[in-house]
Image (spheres, rainbow, N blue to C red):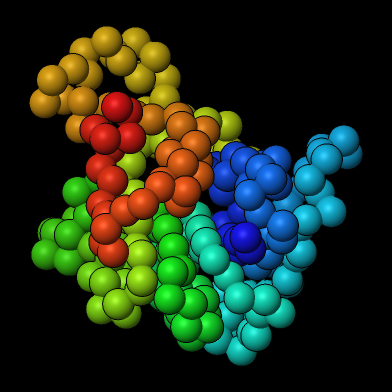
Amino acid sequence: MIAAIVGATGLVGKSLLELLLDSEIYQKVYVLGRAKPQLAAHHWGEEKLHYIACQLDELHEIELPDTVDHAFCCLGTTIKQAGSQQAFIEVDKLGVLAFAKLVHKQQHPKLVFQVISALDASPKSSIFYNRVKGEMEQQLTQLHLPHLHIFQPSLLIGQREESRPAEQIGQWLFAFTSLFFIGPLLKYKPIHATDVAKAMFEYAQTAMPPLAIIDNKTLHQ
């Protein structure tokens, strides 16, 4: 099989890329983005990695050399990091849609497209972040991809290369309050990025309905 991934230098993307390269399921892994992922020198699957340098607004100009079986979208930023609400939209909605259209135009009848969204994403949300994520989900469903898996994690736990103070505080609080996220509160329990990556990898190999939404509670289970 052949995989493609965007957001491979992010928190979830880094872990997922390693799983893809380690697996014998994939013969090639196309990585699209501004920066080539840094792998350990001893990584045995490195020869399967095919890097395509591009900006998100250039995705519509790309022709992939091979038909992609599984596409993984791990794009995600913050308004502070992006610089403005519009810049955030260009990554978390427009970039995602551009990647989906890139692989969808290959017309693979069994294409699996996976994307990381967010807990409580809704196009009707009064919260800007959740509304943009919800709009992204809504527009992805309108593309009628053969198989669309939407992952909705809560706060992601892990060591980022860039500083995100709010997430660092959240991770610190999680260390002291994790035992209280039970029952209905399990929906909001922060989750390790490596666990999200593992779930994405496993769901890609599992027979699923055309549209599957995997919420935070299911990710923990």
On screen, residue 66 above or below 129: below
Q: Is residue 59 left or right of residue 44?
A: left
Residue 33 in view, yes or no:
no
The answer to which image quadrant residue 59 occupies is bottom right
| Residue displayed at 53% across by 83% down | 106
Where residue 183 appears, x then y in whole percent? 13, 20
Residue at the far bottom: name it: 61
- Asked if residue 60 shows in the view, the reply is yes
Please name the residue shown 52% across and 33% down the image: 194
* Count of labels in the image: 0
Q: Nearer the viewer, residue 21 or 81?
A: 21
* In this rendering, position of residue 127 left or right of residue 87: left
Residue at 34% over, 10% down: 176
When the figure is inspected, residue 118 is found, relative to residue 61, above or below; the finding is above
- Left or right of residue 167: residue 215: left
The answer to whether 87 is drawn above or below residue 203 in the figure is below
Locate residue 159, reporting x and y percent.
Answer: 57, 32
Which quarter of the rendered picture does the C terminus lie within? Answer: top left
Percent coordinates x, y for residue 168 in the rendering: 46, 30
Percent of width and height locating residue 132: 28, 65
Q: Where, quadrant-wise, is the N terminus in this rendering? A: bottom right
Residue lying at 75% horizontally and 65% vertically, measured from the top left = 51
Closest to the observer, 120 or 101: 101
